[in-house]
Amino acid sequence: MAVRVEERVVWRTLFFYCFFIYDMGLQLRPQDGKVGMKRGGEVL
């Protein structure tokens, strides 16, 4: 049970961290081609 809870916490933390980096990337480097999809769908 502890392992499961720890797994969920780790996955949630990783997801939040990736989302935070993704959002910061959009704000700091909106025209960077390395950033995946933009909010407006300009770069796919």
Image (cartoon, rainbow, N blue to C red):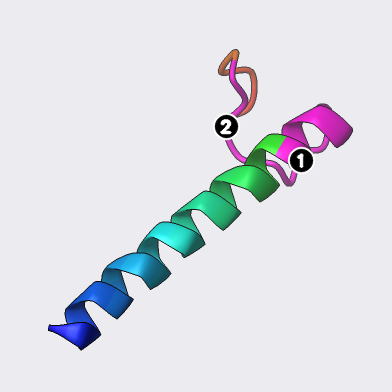
Q: What residue occupies the far top of the structure in this picture? A: 40
Q: Residue 33, how many percent across, how many down? A: 76, 39
In-image side of 7 versus 19 (left or right): left
The answer to whether residue 21 is above or below residue 32 is: below
Residue under label 2, please give it.
37
Mark 1 closeness class: few <14, some 14–19, many ≥20 residues within 10 Å: some
Q: Residue 28, how many percent across, how many down? A: 87, 34
Quadrant of the image containing the C terminus: top right
Quadrant of the image containing the N terminus: bottom left
Residue at image location 75% in from the left, 39% down from the top: 24
Residue at image location 36% in from the left, 67% down from the top: 9
For the record, the magenta segment spans 24-39
Kind of residue at badge 1: Gly
The answer to whether residue 20 is above or below residue 29 is: below
Q: Residue 19, how many percent across, how many down? A: 56, 45
Per the model, the C-alpha gap separating discs 2 and 1 is: 11 Å
Identify the element where label 2 is drawn.
loop
Mark 2 closeness class: few <14, some 14–19, many ≥20 residues within 10 Å: few
Residue at image location 70% in from the left, 42% down from the top: 35
Residue 27 included in the magenta stretch of the image: yes
Residue under label 1, please give it.
25
Q: What residue occupies the far front of the structure in this picture? A: 2
Q: Is any part of residue 42 visible from this angle?
A: yes
Identify the element where label 1 is drawn.
helix
